[in-house]
Structure formats: C-alpha cells, structure tokens
Image (cartoon, rainbow, N blue to C red):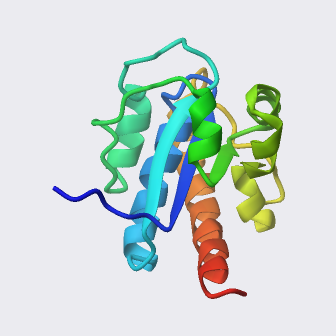
Amino acid sequence: MPQQEFDYSILFVCMGNICRSPTAEGMFLKVLAERAPELRIQVDSAGTHAYHVGEPPDPRSQRAARRRGIDLSRQRARLVSTGDFEHFDLVLAMDELNRDMLIEQSPPEFRGRIRLFLEFAPQLGRSAVPDPYYGGSNGFEYVLDLVEEASTGLIEHLRGRASGV
C-alpha cells in the first residue's frame, strides 16, 4: 500500500496522554472530516510523562467522546520523543506547564513549532485546556467543548496557510 502524503502534521500533547491530548486528536479529526476533508493532515498525540504509556485513553474521556460520535478506543498513550519535534509541523500543548516542558525538551531549531492549542480559539479567553482527570464527568465535556472550538480555529488557520493568506 502506498504511503499517504500529508500537507501538514500536528501533535497534540498533555501530561499523560490519556485525557486531553487524545480527546484533542479525536475531535480535531472529526472537525477536519466535517469541515475540511480536502486538507491532508497527519495527527497524533503524546504525553510529556510516561505514567500511562501503552494504555488506552481514560474511560471517562472515551465515554464523553463517544457521545459526540468520536471513537478514541484505538489510541494508546505514548511519550513525546525527540524525533517528534522534527517530524511534526505543529506541537500543540494543552497548557503552559506542558508547553514549557516541550520547549525545554525540544532541540532549539524546532521550538517555534510548539504552541498552546487554545491559541487557535482566542474567543474563549483562556490559554489552557484544564485537566479533567481528578474532576467529575462535566470536566470531560468541557474539554470537548474547548478542543472543538480550537479545532475549528486551527482548521481556519491551516486553510489560510494553504491558500497563502
């Protein structure tokens, strides 16, 4: 089977890669398929900590996503690798702590690729996607709301890049 060509690649990153970043990956793929299927974008997610490597997303994340038609069950947590900074065009952190950890880990020439995901949804008036891990189920719904808004903004940003705007 021929390898698919991608125009762009994006890595979503949180701490353990079982709540926020897999949810962002799943939501972004859904919004991409609905709003911009012509864009060929490779998407993945990873964590800055190895707490859950190899595990599927948190069951609460999976349930919340499934209610919105998103299947996260095939994803498995992995740790950000040094090669990710070269491979991915954008490395999008869910919060400032993880962004700072990524900047520290990244080779200097790739640090410009690291951004906060919510930069693509300035109308939300916040910079971080909160970690729902220790909260109730409404936290997982809120994360979905935030990453849906940011996904829409990111797609508009990528469309602008594709058209040279």
* Residue positioned 35% across, 38% down in the render: 63
Q: In the displayed structure, would residue 105 be above or below residue 9? A: above
- Left or right of 93 in this view: 138: left
Q: Residue furthest top?
A: 51
**Which quadrant is the C terminus positioned in?**
bottom right
Q: In the displayed structure, would residue 118 be above or below residue 162? A: above
**Which quadrant is the N terminus positioned in?**
bottom left
> Residue 83: x percent and y percent?
58, 34
> Residue 16: x percent and y percent?
56, 22
Nearest to the observer: residue 110 or residue 161: 110
Nearest to the observer: residue 26 or residue 145: 26
Nearest to the observer: residue 74 or residue 78: 78
> Residue 81: x percent and y percent?
58, 27
- Left or right of 17 in this view: 120: right
* Residue positioned 31% across, 61% down in the render: 4
Nearest to the observer: residue 146 or residue 160: 160
Q: Residue furthest left?
A: 1
> Residue 102: x percent and y percent?
74, 32
* Residue positioned 44% across, 26% down in the render: 77
| The quarter of the displayed image where residue 34 is located | bottom left
Q: In the displayed structure, would residue 59 be above or below residue 148? A: above
* Residue positioned 60% across, 26% down in the render: 135
How many discs appear?
A: 0
| The quarter of the displayed image where residue 163 is located | bottom right
- Left or right of 121 in this view: 45: left
